[in-house]
Each structure stands twice: as structure tokens, then as C-alpha cells.
Image (cartoon, helix red, strand yellow):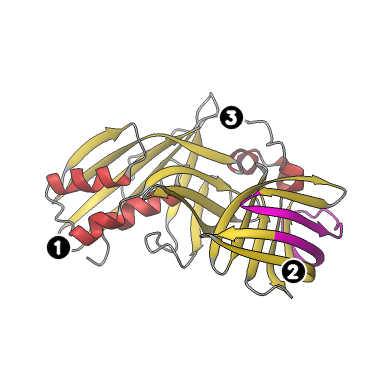
Amino acid sequence: MKKTFIFMAMAAFAAVCFTACGSDDDDYVAPKYNVELPLPQNAKDAVSFENIEGMNELDGITFTEAGNAIVEVAGKFVSAKYTVANSVYTLTGAAKGTVTRQAFANSRGTATAPANISIDLEVIVDGQTYNFTGDAEADAQTATELISNVNLNNICRKWTFKDMALSLSGQVSMMKTYQSGDLSQLGKDANDNGAGLTAEELAELNKTIVSLEFTKTGKLFFIYKENGKEITESATWNSSDFLNFIVDEISDANKFIDKNSKIQVAYSANGACTISFFTKITGSKTYDAQLTVNLE
């Protein structure tokens, strides 16, 4: 299939956080509530270092609003925790050690500026240990703007899975809700209703949604479990109003999130988050798909 049910499920999974995206259904109106969530504890500390020079295989480090450090090594991502004091970020977990940066002025908007950083890290990726020690140059991104933008503040945090619902219409028709994030069950149910997914396609859906996290530096990290292993993947996003998002770029390891996928976010009065992803599936059969996911 050119576009398969797998694409829909995984793109929605990576999008996980919104309601009613660019659907062809003009009658659908996404609920939007006047909600302002408290800032995450590490909102002021969030920064992303990319294009790190002088550290072979260390591709990037993102310190998120939720206190997570996402480290990219040799094209793969690991997640750790961090604390920060006096411009020294201390990491613990799969990545441990310190990253020290020169202070730079806050700017309005998401800005990229060169930065000098000192790194002393041990990172474990797929059982292999990498050590990085010394001084390096990097592109530093920060977004302090936007501290006044409620929608951006609301989305930039870690979200965990609650439940989801799938609706297919056209040559394949079904509607079902799920209390787990098991994507393999979506594939099985779609096949029971005539989707005709291959064994290989079903195997690719052997993933369970765990969580996802947006950052003010335009990053989207999503975590799922596959064969008992927890995996972190990455995408980038852009938005003009922080309610409507476009996915720009997907990490090489993820094949199922389409570039320029459109998603829209809405929040409930209790601070939860809902997303719906809409797509037209074209292949051996043609049908419309909507996957709605609730997070908290």
C-alpha cells in the first residue's frame, strides 16, 4: 500500500496530543477550552543543543520543560533526567554526567545561537556505552517567548496515554474505543473489518503508546514499547498559533509519520489533552481514518 493503516496509526501516535486536525470533514468542530495549565517545573531551563562539533557520534541534547534530557547518539535517542544549577546540567539514568554552557540572553521567539559547552557524559545506547568528555561548540536553541503564550505553555510538557478511539469509513468501516495504547489491536480490528493488512504490516504495528513530549524548541519526542523494550523517537514541529501543528521532519528510525502531517490540539477543563488525526488511506482499498487519543 502507498499509504497504509500503519501510517495512520503511527502518525497519530507521534502526534498524540490533539483534537481534530486537517480533516476533510468541514462540519467537525474541535472542542477548545479556555485552559491555562501551570508551567512545568523546568520551563525556564529548557534548551536544545544541536550540530555538536568536537564530539563524534553525539548528535544532540535536548533539555525539556518536563525535566527530561533526550540525548541523540549515532542516530538513536535515550532519555534521562536532569537538574540544573549555575548553568550546569546534571544528568542521571541512561545518560549520566554533566553539560555546562555559557549563559546566553533570553530572546523573544525560538532563537538559535552558537554556544560553547563542556561535556562529561556516559551514555548507554542499546547496551553499548559511549563516553564524551571535553569542550565543544553547538547550536543552542531556546524559546522564552512565548512564556506569555498560553497555548504554547500548555502543550510543552510530557503527556501520558489514557485511551483512544478508531473510526474507519468508506470501503472499510468500523468504530471502536480502546483502553490501552496497543497499536497491534488496531491492526487486527481493521483486518477483521476488511482492511487487508499484510503480516508484515501487522508486525510493524507491534507497538504500545507510552507517552510523548513537546518542547518549545520545536521538538516532539514520543515513547513506545516494542517487544518489551522502551524506545524514544523524535520529530520536529512548527505552528503559528500552538493549536494547529505541522510535523516537519521525522527521525530516520521512524517510517510511519508522514512529513507535513497536520494535527490540532485541544484541552479539557481538567488539564487533559485530546488529539484526533485524520487521513485518507489509499492502497488496495480506499477509506478515511480517524484516530483520537486522550492524554493526561
* Label 1, residues with CA under 10 Å away: few <14, some 14-19, many ≥20: few
Tag 2: amino acid: Ala
Q: Secondary structure at mark 2?
A: strand
Tag 1: amino acid: Ser
Residue at horizontal 44%, vertical 48%?
Answer: 224
188 or 73, which lies in front?
73
Mark 1 vs mark 2: in front: 2
Q: CA distance from mark 3 to mark 1?
A: 43 Å
Residue at horizontal 40%, vertical 59%?
Answer: 257
Task: Give percent across and percent down for residue 74.
Answer: 56, 69
Residue matched to label 2 = 138
Q: Is residue 239 visible?
A: no
- Prevailing secondary structure of the magenta residues: strand
Mark 3 vs mark 1: in front: 1
Q: Secondary structure at mark 1?
A: loop
Is residue 38 found inside the magenta-colored segment of the image? Answer: no
Mark 2 vs mark 3: in front: 2
Q: Quadrant of residue 3?
A: bottom left
Task: Give percent across and percent down for residue 98.
Answer: 77, 55
| 6 in relation to 118, above or below | above
Left or right of residue 272, residue 55 in this image: right
Residue matched to label 1 = 284
Q: Does label 1 or label 2 sit earlier along the sequence?
A: 2
Residue at horizontal 33%, vertical 43%?
Answer: 291
Q: Secondary structure at mark 3?
A: loop
Give the magenta range: 93-121
Residue 35 badge: 3
Q: Does label 2 or label 3 sit earlier along the sequence?
A: 3
Tag 3: amino acid: Val
* Label 3, residues with CA under 10 Å away: few <14, some 14-19, many ≥20: some
